[in-house]
Image: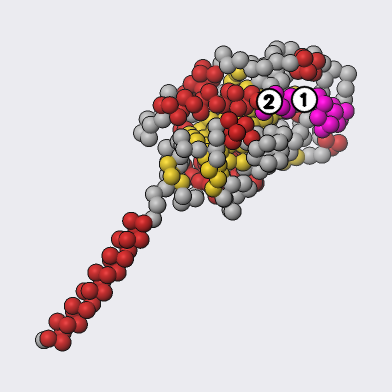
Amino acid sequence: MTVIFTHFFRVASVAALLLAALAVRAFARPRPIEVKVVVVAMFEAGEDTGDEPGELQFWVERDHLDRIYPLPAGYHAARMNDAGEMAIVTGQGTAQAAATIMALGLDPRFDFSHAYWIVAGIAGASPDRASLASAVWARWVVDGGMAYELDARQIPPDWSTGFVPLHKTRPFEEPAEILDGQVFALNPQLAQWAFELTRDTPLADSEHLQKTRVQFDGAVAQRPPFVTMGDELSSPTYWHGSRFDAWAAQWVRYFTGGKGEFATSAMEDAGTLQSLQFLARAKRVDWQRILVLRTVSNYDREPRGLSASESLSIQRAGTAGAYLPAIESAYTVGHVVVSKILQHWQRDKILP
């Protein structure tokens, strides 16, 4: 009996020590950092600070995002300040954006369950909907890459485009069949709140912008920069020209049942939103707390007197756009919303 009791005591002692060790480890493990808002930029021109800015730099310098968290599984390290504001660079294109956002969203160092996400970057835009350096809040983001495509030289004469929706036999064949990851409907109340909050935000105009926009036709092409609402076509291909502009407008209307109105074109947001949607299913993020803001660095079509190819060549040379003004507008408008979120953030209540 004494032997049995001694053995039992030893086993119990070992179990108690193991439990104590596990408790110590659990107690020692740091709690995830609660993030209140994430600014999603797509590229940086060079260093994060001190040189020509990309989409990240103004956020880092002006909001003092001095805490750096390496993200080996993503494109770029995350940066953060003590107020709960984080910024990340996804890398250009759908694939890098999707991979980086997924890597960040699954990182156990952070708690994103009540964080707001604000995509804040530059874009092309239709001069019928937004002018150079204007800021556009989206309610819809539609993927423009999930399609069949015919070479332009082989398009039937009665077709308006060579793009055909998957599972269809001709462009814009009804009824529209929306595939997973093709259309993202954002929280319309949150988008409207962001727009109302920022609609009167002053955006700088300049002689360069005036001289550039006077060359273009479009309902709002001649307006100084302003804040508006409009929807985005997200495509990994950088397309350009008036015919593509017409296709994008119809593509967005087709896949949103006439509810969306094309305004901006960008490359990454379908990937970013797809990852956020999956993360929301896993209860890692709140889908209702996502905003997309794009600012106009260039018009998506050619000016008067030039072909689409000539226009693209000039844009690539960097002489006919609004790159730096659009970078400034993204921060100016986005920061108004970020500041309001940080002032009134609550875990269990969505602004507004």
> Where residue 189 sits: x, y (%)?
47, 23
> Where residue 288 sits: x, y (%)?
46, 33
Q: Residue at x 49, y 49 (%)?
A: 106
Residue 203 is drawn in which quadrant?
Answer: top right
Tell me if 252 is positioned left or right of 306 in this view: left
Instruction: Give the residue pinned by disc 2.
Output: 326
Tell me if 22 is positioned left or right of 122 in this view: left
Instruction: Give the residue pinned by disc 1.
Output: 321
Q: Secondary structure at mark 1?
A: loop
Q: Earlier in the sequence, mark 1 or mark 2?
A: 1
Three-letter residue code for mark 2: Ala
Residue 87 is drawn in which quadrant?
Answer: top right
- Say if mark 1 contacts mark 2, CB within 8 Å: yes
Q: Residue 25 colored magenta?
A: no
Whether residue 245 is situated above or below residue 215 in the rendered picture: below
> Where residue 312 sits: x, y (%)?
83, 30
Quadrant housing the C terminus: top left
Q: Nearer the viewer, residue 310 or 172?
A: 310
Quadrant housing the N terminus: bottom left
Whether residue 27 is situated above or below residue 35 in the rendered picture: below
Q: Residue at x 65, y 25 (%)?
A: 328
Magenta span covers which residues?
A: 308-327
Q: Nearer the viewer, residue 127 or 171?
A: 127
